[in-house]
């Protein structure tokens, strides 16, 4: 089985795509055959995929094998309404076979796949399954991208607890926007340092993040839902 890293976050608009693109560039620069997929994207209006198109463009820049890929290969499931997939789909069940086929096609061209989630871990895919279930189902390790605003301690710990309950290997990294950084350094970072929790900052530690993510990968037996 190929290596799979699922990039998730504490919420929407935290920096999953931003982080994924940085990792794509870094892995490719190191000679790793890397691909990326976003299983579900909402807010797709008039054929415009805000995240998927950025991912596809970057893949084509890094590897000519992806020139033949279409946006549907990168984002196999898309909805117009910018809401949780369960809401945006009108309640239809997620098609795991469709997701599996898209991932299998991606893995014919790479040894490592970055999988981008939608929103946070407990965004509902359908009535039964949540985003976190995709990580377990596809036997991936996880990178949790978290914010640097007031409240990041609570949001980060809740997401870490969810990952640990599922025994999902993970790292977590803060994506600090410029206006957040000073506040984070003074009000939130000291807590994680005091607790001796290994954490990283995306812009400062991306190479270390990339290396450690490869080490977190384990190849468990295929899981079923």
Image (cartoon, rainbow, N blue to C red):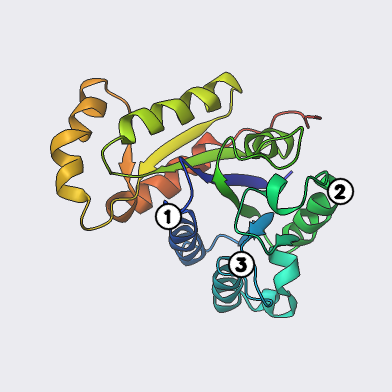
Considering the numbered disc 2 on the image, is that residue within a helix, a strand or a loop?
helix
- Whether residue 224 sits left or right of residue 185 in the image: it is right
- Counting other residues with Cα less than 10 Å from the Cα at mark 1, is it few (<14), some (14-19), or many (20 or more)? many
Helix, strand or loop for disc 1: loop
Residue 38 seen: no
Q: Which residue is mark 2?
A: 97
Displayed quadrant of residue 157: top left
* Residue placed under numbered mark 1 in the picture: 15
- In primary-sequence order, the first of circles 1 and 2 is 1
Left or right of 94 in this view: 48: left
* Residue at the image point whose x is 65% and y is 79% from the top: 64
Quickly name the residue at label 3.
52
Residue at image x 22%, y 26%?
Answer: 191
Image height of 32 relative to 64, above or below: above
Question: Disc count in the image?
Answer: 3
| Residue 193 point in image, percent of width and height | 22, 27
- Report which quarter residue 174 is drawn in: top left
Q: Determine the CA span between mark 2 and mark 3.
A: 20 Å
For marks 1 and 3 on the same chain, the one whose residue lies earlier in the sequence: 1
């Amino acid at each position: 089985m190929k290596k799979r890293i699922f990039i998730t976050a504490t919420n929407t608009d935290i920096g999953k795509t931003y982080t994924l693109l940085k990792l794509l560039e870094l892995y490719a620069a190191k000679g790793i055959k890397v691909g990326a997929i976003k299983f579900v994207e909402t807010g797709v209006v008039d054929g415009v995929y805000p995240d998927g198109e950025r991912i596809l463009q970057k893949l084509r820049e890094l590897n000519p094998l992806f020139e033949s890929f279409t946006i549907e290969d990168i984002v196999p499931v898309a909805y117009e309404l910018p809401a949780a997939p369960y809401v945006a789909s009108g309640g239809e069940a997620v098609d795991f076979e469709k997701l599996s086929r898209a991932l299998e096609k991606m893995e014919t061209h790479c040894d490592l796949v970055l999988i981008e989630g939608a929103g946070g871990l407990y965004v509902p895919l359908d009535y039964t399954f949540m985003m976190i279930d995709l990580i377990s189902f596809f036997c991936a390790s996880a990178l949790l991208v978290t914010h640097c605003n007031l409240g990041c301690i609570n949001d980060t710990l809740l997401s870490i607890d969810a990952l640990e309950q599922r025994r999902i290997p993970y790292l977590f990294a803060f994506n600090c926007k410029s206006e957040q950084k000073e506040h984070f350094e003074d009000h939130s970072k000291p807590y994680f340092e005091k607790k001796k929790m290994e954490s990283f900052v995306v812009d400062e530690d991306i190479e270390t993040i990339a290396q450690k993510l490869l080490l977190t990968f384990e190849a468990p037996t295929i899981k079923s839902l």
